[in-house]
Amino acid sequence: MPKKKYDVIIVGGGGHGLATAYYLAKVHGITNIAVLEKGYLGGGNTARNTTIVRSNYLWDESAKLYEHAMKLWEGLSQDLNYNVMFSQRGVLNLGHTLQDMRDIERRVHANRLNGIDGEVLDAQQIKEIVPMMDCSDRPRYPIMGASWQPRGGVARHDAVAWGYARAADALGVDLIQQCEVVDIIIEDGAATGVMTNSHGVIEADRIGCVTAGNSSVMAKMAGFRLPLESHPLQALVSEPIKPILDTVVMSNHVHGYISQSDKGDLVIGAGIDGYNGYGQRGSYHTIEHTVQAIVELFPVFSRVRMNRQWGGIVDTCPDACPIISATPVENLFFNCGWGTGGFKATPGSGHVFAATLAAGEASEMAKPFSMFRFYDGALIDEHGAAGVAH
């Protein structure tokens, strides 16, 4: 049974919520915490993403946040004493037009100014890294070059959730599953607790909502709106095949990305579905479009069979950057709007949000991501770097 009152309640038991609870306990010494999850830990987008990790974003604010996450990734297995299978196999972002290449060069230069690794490669250098990719002039969109971040890679998504959950539990955090928050209790303009479907009212001094595609629903309970849209995001895996692809390949132009898991599956995905919704089933035409893009890049994969596909619900902001922010309701904070970039940010998101909850105000790295930037116009447009779901 949960306690009647906590110092902090985290709503949402995915990677970001569990990371927030862990860093609150470890870094800030706040252990009287409850993580409330309506399903099971790590059962939402954490279990449904395609596990790519990179930090090569364009603008200073987002680049610093994702690089902060990258540095935490690099020591995460040791920190949690749990193998999250982080594999720094490199990430290629392909360019197919002159404008693509101009954008790639601009982004790589910006990354280097921020101390983030990156190189601009030509087609021959790409061919040396990924020999089976069609780098000839035959495809509809020939490959002209790419950005290359050697420190990027992939990690095991469920191991990240399990690792953070185990570490938070060891520090005294209460992890409460099958406990859906159905209302936020507000008295005199301040949040004082939550109403749950299984344990009634649970009070707290501060509440952090980390509920991804359901963040708009949570905000409505508190009486305000967020500038978010929720979209289905689909992915698929192939049947297992022998190791052939040892890096991550992404293309905004043909709209697809691919890596190979340790089990041998080809992990494939693309952009968000064009419609708003909360369905996790996906749709055939989106999968067909994605597979067409991958086969154009890799004709050798044309006869590999699809094993399964699925969908998740992503929350997207107008400027393709997250919200890590206080709200119009005192003591209520939101961490959301990660869109297609949530998994790669997991450690950084939790670390920064924990600092915000501990202080009761935005930490230095969180300040640019206030929800109120949509009132004052200080947006951080990352549509170029976040153009494909990854």
Image (cartoon, rainbow, N blue to C red):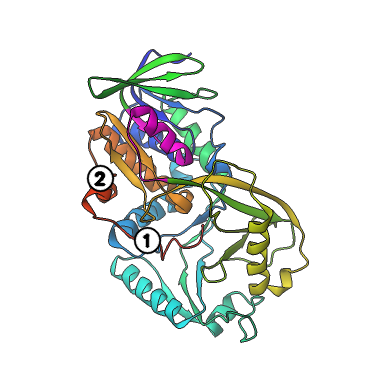
* Mark 2: few/some/many CA within 10 Å (<14, 14-19, 20+): some
Residue lying at 64% horizontally and 63% vertically, measured from the top left: 289
Q: Was residue 383 drawn as part of the magenta stretch in this picture?
A: no
Q: Which residue is mark 1?
A: 382
Residue 150 percent across, percent down from the top left: 47, 67
Image height of 276 relative to 8, above or below: below
Q: Was residue 222 drawn as part of the magenta stretch in this picture?
A: yes
Give the left or right position of residue 72, taking residue 236 as reference.
Answer: left
Residue type at tag 2: Phe
Q: Which residues are magenta?
A: 207-228
Which residue is outermost to the front? 275
Residue type at tag 1: Glu
Residue lying at 55% horizontally and 78% vertically, measured from the top left: 126
Res 372 label: 2
Give the left or right position of residue 315, taking residue 309 as reference.
Answer: left
- Residue 137, image quadrant: bottom right
